[in-house]
Image (cartoon, rainbow, N blue to C red):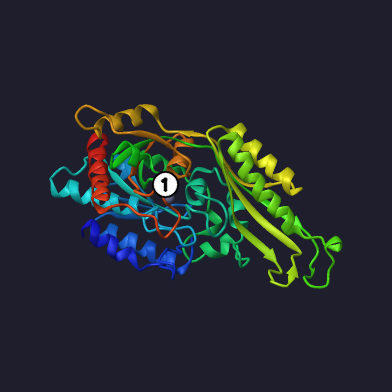
Amino acid sequence: MTFAGMWAELAAIGRAPSGGYRRFAWTRTDAVLREWFTASAQARGLDVVGDRAGNLWAWTADPDAHGPGLVLGSHLDSVPDGGAFDGPLGVVSAFAALDLLRASGRAPTRPLGIACFSDEEGARFGVACAGSKLLTGALDADRARALTDADGTWMAEAMRDSLDVAAVGRDEETLRRVGTFVELHVEQGRSLVDFDAAVGVASSIWPHGRWRLDLRGRADHAGTTRLADREDPMLALAAAVLAARSAAEQAGTVATIGKLAVAPNGVNAIPSSVTAWLDARGGREADVRAVVAAVGDAAGAEPVEESWTGPTVFDPALRDRLATALGTDGVPAPVLPTGAGHDAGVLAAAGVPTAMLFVRNPTGVSHSPAEHAEEADCLAGVAALARVVQELA
Ligand SMILES: [Zn+2]
């Protein structure tokens, strides 16, 4: 199965009318993607094992007997109406890199693993990288089980068909098998366009987090309630949205309010409550915290922290080694930071030697149906991943 063949197999799964994808954790769509992963691994003679966090690991050889191994991979879930590349590119490229190495008689001697992390985007339960954070213990198992989606379904219920919910949590046995992790991902920016390069190496991930703003008011009639008599939480939201923009501009960070729940959500009703979610990221933690505080002040509500990830610096020696190995004519491949969180960042924070490769995104657009990468660049990514395996395994 070629890269294009695998890409075509995934194309219809979870496709939304927008042309983007709705591939949320622990749904039927997610199960179909996981079945695809398992079938693709088994077709290559790999052994697929799940872990205590619901992530899937496909191994070429026994990592307990001959490990620890080198692991490639990424995730298959998406944000609402996300693009085709964020996540799946890393998984498909890992299988394609293995195929490339085997076809040229350079199959790795060390056990090679391909990982499919569960619930990376946190689109359903609100915690990003839930699968890798459960694996490393960065997300408390009780907290995870009690997370609810928009319909009030607990994560524990959603997981029940796929894994032993009582055993969910940090998984030492799985972590021991991972000697090195390398995640290939579509770039979520335009740095590689500026570098005129198809593939780059990540240096670090910005500190980032998510906060919830609970804005309360009083439901009332939009026609008969005098302005002076209203308690309208939408005004606090408006102030929060503008403050997020101006505070981020001032601090040199980014901040976004991109998700709302309005009650009762009627055109002719003053809202009784507005719940808003703030995503804030930046190069320095203090700057990000200052932006969040400014948004809370503007809204008149204390932001509730739903997740926080400190700065992640990828293993510098590994990063430099890969940049050199992937360079051309003695010039190393570009090295760049990112504002996006990844499972690779979670593993790096847990002490696993970790690196990331980025594949050029011509527009920089991501988390959107318009997300794109040229096939030639994707194949350059596959070749780079194969080169990395040769270097490390
Ligand atoms: Zn991703």
- Residue type for callout 1: Gln
Quadrant assignment, res 383: top left
Q: Residue at x 39, y 35 (%)?
A: 336
- Location of mark 1 (residue): 188
Instruction: Name the side, left or right, on which 9 lies relative to 150.
Output: left
Say if disc 1 is inside 8 Å of ligand 1.
yes
Residue at the image position 57 percent from the left and 61 percent from the top: 156
Please indicate whether residue 29 sits to the left or right of residue 390 in the image. right
Q: Which quadrant: the C terminus?
A: top left
Q: Is residue 366 visible from the viewing direction of this image? A: yes
Q: Is 325 in front, or is 20?
A: 20
Going by the picture, which residue comes out furthest to the right? 229
How many callouts does the rendering have?
Answer: 1
Q: Position of residue 127 (x, y in %)?
A: 56, 51
Residue in the foreground of this view, choosing between 128 and 353: 128
- The residue nearer to you, when weighing 180 against 127, is 127
